Image (spheres, grey):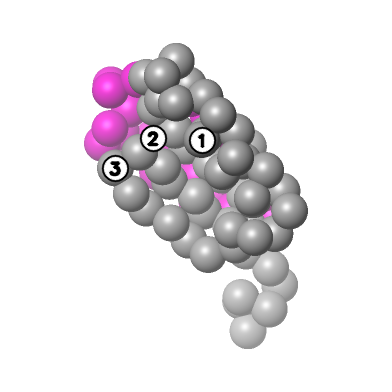
Amino acid sequence: MVEVDGSQHAHDIRDVHRDETMNRNGRSVIRVWHIDVLQRRKQLLGTIVAVLDGRLDNKTIALDLMFLPAHSNEDHL
């Protein structure tokens, strides 16, 4: 799932809960800011392609990007 957020989502506990639920159900989550979609589209698309290609597969939390890879069954062992 790719989600484009505004600043009102910066510390929203509902988003955290939804992200965790999506991860447990085998879905990865990429969360970006709307301003980056408007001003840094090429870089953002490059990041999304890196996730799809498997080049970015580690949990990443930065100021301009949050990527939570899906949990695999092996993660729960």
The answer to whether residue 34 is seen in the rendering is no
Under mark 2, the amino acid is Arg
Q: Which residue shows up at 61% across the image and 75% down it?
A: 75
User: Which residue corresponds to mark 1?
Assistant: 43
Q: Is 51 placed above or below 40 here?
A: below
Q: From the image, state whether disc 2 or disc 3 is nearer to you.
A: 3
- For mark 3, give the secondary structure: loop
Distance of label 1 from label 2 (alpha carbons) = 28 Å
Report if residue 21 lies within the magenta region: yes
Q: From the image, state whether disc 1 or disc 3 is nearer to you.
A: 1
Q: Which residues are magenta?
A: 2-27
Q: Which residue shows up at 49% across the image and 50% down it?
A: 67
- For mark 2, give the secondary structure: helix
Q: From the image, state whether disc 1 or disc 2 is nearer to you.
A: 1
The furthest residue to the front: 42
The answer to whether residue 15 is seen in the rendering is yes
User: Which residue corresponds to mark 3?
Assistant: 63
Quadrant assignment for the N terminus: top right
Distance of label 1 from label 3 (alpha carbons) = 14 Å
Is there CB contact under 8 Å for labels 2 and 3?
Answer: no
- For mark 1, give the secondary structure: helix
Q: Answer few, some or many: residues within 10 Å of disc 1's Cα (few below 14, many 20 plus, some between 14 and 19).
A: few
User: Which residue corresponds to mark 2?
Assistant: 14
